[in-house]
Amino acid sequence: RIEVIGKRGKPLSRVSGGSGRESTSFLACISADGTPLSPFIIFKRGAVQTRWISTKAYPGTVYMASSNGWMEEPVKALLLYDGHNSHISLRIIECAIENKISLVKLPTHLTNRLHPLDKGIFGPVKTSWKKKLIAHGKKHMGHGVRQLKKNEFTELLREVWRESNTENNIKNSFLTTRVFPINSGKFPEEEFSPIELKRYKENKQTIIENN
């Protein structure tokens, strides 16, 4: 999305900066106790350069680099994923096993209610990020199209992360989704797919009998 900035009452035009954009990944983590974890940033480069690391970045920010700016290294993790059938395959399951990732399939059509980050954090993050980019554009107005520098990205992210991750926001994100504290009775059975609910109950009964 592109924001066009100009004086009120004056004709505006948009100038694109070309296709020379780079991918930068930001791993967002929060804890159910209301604590925001430090950002994990992956730049598209062979190695992290010291000039990218700003003293004004969020405290404890971790920096990594990869050839494509994506997350590549295997780590132990618990992955809550969208329960839609198109989002899972045998290859994904095999990949998860190979990389020691535990998969937890969220109930179909209830993902938007069960993701803590989606429920209470990413909304404020997007709103704050938009405001920061507009302010940054106004500050550098008159200098032509200018790519956001990596150290500037980390500084803006610090402000956004601090504003969005209040203790109340984080705790309410887990509370409203009932991920923590766990509340299995949050959603009535009629909101689930009858077929999948039947399969779940049968599998649960099988596990109980086998134990």
Image (cartoon, rainbow, N blue to C red):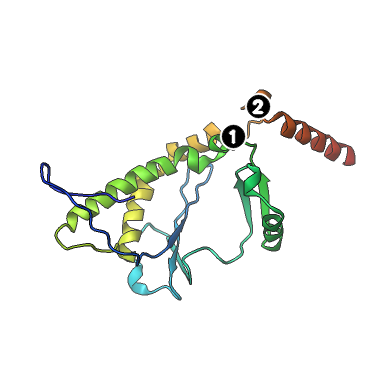
The C terminus is located in which quarter?
top right
Identify the residue position indicated by label 2 in the image. Answer: 185
The answer to whether residue 136 is above or below residue 113 is: below
**Separation of residues labelled 1 and 2 (CA atoms):** 14 Å
Cβ atoms at labels 1 and 2 below 8 Å apart = no
Residue in view at x 30 percent, y 51 percent: 2
Identify the residue position indicated by label 1 in the image. Answer: 110
Q: Position of residue 153 (x, y in %)?
A: 33, 60
Front-most of 132 and 57?
132
Front-most of 191 and 42?
191
In this view, the residue farthest toward the right is: 210
- Crowding around mark 2 (Cα neighbors within 10 Å: few <14, some 14 to 19, many 20+) is few
Front-most of 64 and 10?
10
Task: Identify the element where label 2 is drawn.
Answer: loop
The answer to whether residue 122 is above or below residue 187 is: below
Residue in view at x 49 percent, y 41 percent: 118
Left or right, residue 145 beside residue 129: left
First reached walking from the N terminus: tag 1 or tag 2: 1
Task: Identify the element where label 1 is drawn.
Answer: loop
Q: Name the quadrant containing residue 178.
A: top right
Q: Position of residue 101 (x, y in %)?
A: 66, 56
Residue in view at x 60 percent, y 35 percent: 109
Q: Name the quadrant containing residue 201.
A: top right
Front-most of 200 and 144?
144
Q: Is residue 111 visible?
A: yes
Q: Position of residue 151 (x, y in %)?
A: 32, 65
